[in-house]
């Protein structure tokens, strides 16, 4: 099973940016942990990051016919990108929304996720473990409508 992990804007600065919220681990540290868990679960995982909305959409479109599941931390785009929401809806690949922080316990503008209604589910608040939990979900999506 092939899984695409998409990281949105500012996540390239993990480990430097707002350490109190996001911790001191870098995106590379997360990518390494994702790799290890993927191997354990028998998944083939690609891990990408982009600060550009259009590029994220292009990568989602290109996922069609290649990946059986998508895991996305859309960063701030989560809260307002109808274009990314439409892309997720259009590709018909089960998509798991993730966040390092618990977006529901932070500022009010982070409580809304415009992508949540088109995702299989949401995992947030567990830091790096959000990615690991999402891989377990991706490995077990067999009953899901689009899988
Ligand atoms: C985030 C939460 C978003 O609100 C924020 O804009 C991010 C990171 C998270 O992983 O906790 O960039 O998606």
Image (cartoon, rainbow, N blue to C red):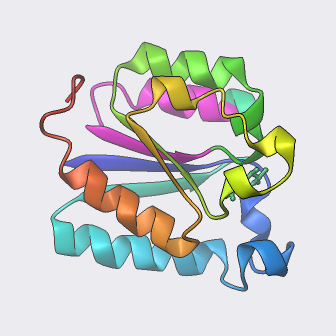
Q: Quadrant of residue 15?
A: bottom right
Split into 4 quadrants, where in the image is the C terminus? top left
Q: Quadrant of residue 105?
A: bottom right
Where residue 91 sits: x, y (%)?
A: 41, 19
Relative to 90, 6 lies left or right: right
Can the viewer see residue 16 in this picture?
no
In this view, the residue in front, 131 or 6, is: 131
Q: Residue at x 40, y 47 (%)?
A: 4
Q: Is residue 26 above or below residue 134?
A: below
Q: Is residue 8 above or below residue 30?
A: above
* Ligand 1 quadrant in view: bottom right
In this picture, which residue range is highlighted in magenta?
55-73
Where residue 99 sits: x, y (%)?
A: 60, 56
Number of marks in the rendered image: 0
Where residue 103 sits: x, y (%)?
A: 70, 52
Q: Quadrant of residue 10?
A: bottom right
Q: Is residue 81 magenta?
A: no
Can the viewer see residue 74 in this picture?
yes
Q: Residue at x 50, y 30 (%)?
A: 60
Relative to 1, 120 lies left or right: right
In this view, the residue in front, 108 or 33, is: 108
Q: Is residue 62 magenta?
A: yes
Q: Is residue 26 above or below residue 5?
A: below
Q: Residue at x 25, y 37 (%)?
A: 68
Q: Residue at x 18, y 50 (%)?
A: 140
Where residue 146 sits: x, y (%)?
A: 24, 23
In this view, the residue in front, 25 or 21, is: 21
């Amino acid at each position: 099973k092939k899984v695409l992990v998409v990281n949105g804007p500012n996540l390239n600065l993990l480990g430097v940016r707002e350490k109190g919220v996001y911790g001191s681990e870098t995106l590379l540290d997360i990518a390494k942990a994702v790799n290890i868990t993927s191997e354990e679960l028998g998944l083939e995982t690609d891990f990408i990051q982009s600060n550009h909305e259009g590029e994220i959409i292009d990568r989602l479109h290109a996922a069609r016919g290649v990946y059986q599941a998508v895991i996305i931390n859309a960063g701030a785009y989560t809260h307002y990108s109808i274009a990314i929401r439409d892309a997720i809806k259009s590709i018909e690949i089960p998509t798991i929304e993730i966040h390092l922080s618990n977006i529901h316990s932070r500022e009010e503008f982070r409580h809304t996720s415009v992508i949540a209604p088109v995702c299989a589910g949401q995992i947030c608040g567990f830091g790096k473990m959000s990615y690991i939990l999402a891989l377990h979900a991706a490995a077990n999506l067999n009953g899901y409508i689009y899988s």
